[in-house]
Amino acid sequence: MNDHDNLGTMVTDVSHLMRRAFDERARNMGISRPQWRVLSTLRRHEGINQGGLAELIEVEPITLCRMADRLQEADLVERRADPADRRAWRLYLTDKARALLDDMRPLAVGLFEDAMSGLDEAERAELLRMLGRIRTNLSRRAPQELIING
């Protein structure tokens, strides 16, 4: 196996290529990939506070705050006061954001279909199963453990 075939390099390359392909396809939709990530994560966790959403998408809270500002200005996100903490805001999608996510769904499905082209159903299922196992393995290990043993 050469350096270009190791797991880390392959996963990084595939991730980069998928991001680039998504950006090309989404360019006409008027939304960036980071904004799409915020909106799609928010769809699954509607009503979450800004700090919790920042954690989920792995960005600094100030970065998420700026993103939420732009999404609110575009009428895609609504901030509501958190009844338990008057300093915090809970985030909700607007109807405009829901429609945009619905419009983008075929784009994402098409991208994944292109990426999985040539793989039959059993191969697709096996690939997802193996990647899921790798994710679980890495999620269970403490960051320090990964550095020492990785």
Image (tube, rainbow, N blue to C red):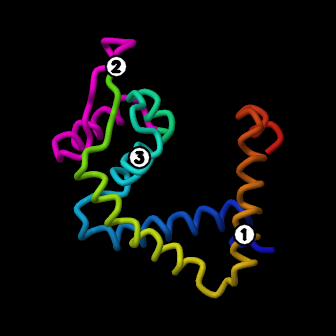
Q: Residue at x 58, y 67 (%)?
A: 13
Assess disc 2: are there few (<14), some (14-19) or many (≥20) residues with their C-alpha within 10 Å of its C-alpha.
some
Residue type highlighted by circle 1: Leu
Q: Earlier in the sequence, mark 2 or mark 1?
A: 2
Q: Quadrant of residue 83?
A: top left
As drawn, the label of residue 138 is: none
Label disc, if present, on residue 82 of the rendered structure: 2
Residue 15 location (% of width, % of height) = 54, 63
Q: Residue furthest front?
A: 95
User: How much space separates mark 2 and mark 1, taking CA atoms?
Assistant: 41 Å
Who is closer to the viewer here, 22 or 80? 80
> Could you tell me which quadrant the C terminus lies in?
top right
> What is the CA distance from the residue labelled 2 to the residue labelled 3?
18 Å
> For the residues carrying marks 2 and 1, which lies nearer the camera in this image?
2
| Mark 3 in CB contact with mark 1 (< 8 angstroms) | no
Give the SS element for disc 2: strand
